[in-house]
Amino acid sequence: MPTPASGQISMSDVNAETNLTQSMSNFFSSSLIGGAGGLMYHNLAMASGNTLTAKAAIYDPYVAGAGGTSANLLLSNWYNYSQTPYGIMTFSLTNNNLENNIDVTIYLRDPTGPTDYQIGNPVPVIFNLNANSGTASYPDYDTGIAMNTTNFTAGIYQIVFDISAIYVGPPPPPGGGVLGNSTSASDTDNVGAGTARVTTNPPNFDATSPITGTALVRGNITGSAGIHINKRTTFDIIFN
């Protein structure tokens, strides 16, 4: 259960949510940890007024000076915190192709399962990109998928895609296809453990050869190619 959003808050409230020893230093230093036991950066409405991201509320005060000071480490900064929030990510999808509408389905994958969870809040969605429609942006998108070790057994995830083309150009199909595509990604907050992202460009495809279950965005955690579940990801995919 998340900590209180306002009013009285105690160290035991934070302890109950995080399972961390009741110490302000322990609470705030969790922002340096990667995985299920670290600060969940997916929390975007924390502190007094519920207006700060987890980074601004917890990481920034802690690293101010050498590990923060008692004056920086305010218990009120832990308002409205959940240790198992829904995953939040920021992304853009660009369709520069003149002949194909493109449908994109996005999943978060437990790579040790593997199990794929289709994103969408409150219901799964398919992102529809009309031919030559340019860029569609999705800042702070709520995936509706809980970032916990029930869904992600090793505390890591990958971002996986199904991508299909619907030919709308002059006959006959499938035309020249969707070629020379690109993927870029980064850690949204760029702090703490596990900021590296590894990407794969979408292969060439057309209306007869979709992309299925392909992990285009991953991390570099040894042996898993995963991203820590407490970390947010920003990615951009361009179709040409």
Image (cartoon, grey):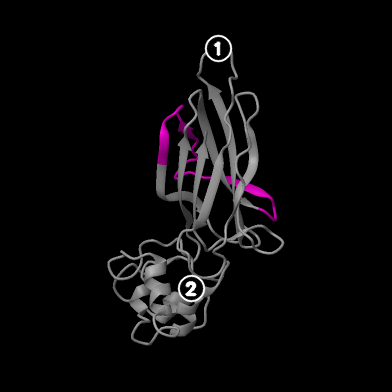
Q: Amino acid at mark 1?
A: Pro
Question: Residue 151: x percent and y percent?
Answer: 60, 55
Taking depth in this image into account, of 201 and 5 the one nearest to the observer is 201
Q: Is residue 194 above or below residue 75?
A: above
Q: Amino acid at mark 2?
A: Ser
Q: Is residue 134 magenta?
A: yes
Separation of disc 1 and disc 2 at Cα? 55 Å
Which image quarter: residue 167?
top right
Q: Nearer the viewer, mark 1 or mark 2?
A: 1
Residue with the mark numbered 2: 31
Horizontally, residue 27 falls left or right of residue 44, namely: right
Residue range highlighted in magenta: 111-136
Residue at left 47%, top 53%? 89
Q: Secondary structure at mark 1?
A: loop
Can residue 159 be seen here? The reply is yes
Residue at the spot 37% in from the left edge and 71% down from the top edge: 57
Residue at 33% in and 86% down: 71
Q: Which mark is residue 163?
A: none
Q: Which residue is mark 1?
A: 171
- Categorize mark 1 by other alpha carbons within 10 Å: few (<14), some (14-19), many (20+): few
Give me the residue at 72% from left, 61% from top: 223
| Viewer-nearest residue: 37 or 185 | 185
Q: Quadrant of the N terminus?
A: bottom left
Percent coordinates x, y for residue 137 in the rendering: 40, 43
Q: Main secondary structure of the magenta part?
A: loop
Between residue 56 and residue 94, name the one nearer to us.
94
Say which label, 1 or 2, has the lower sequence index.
2
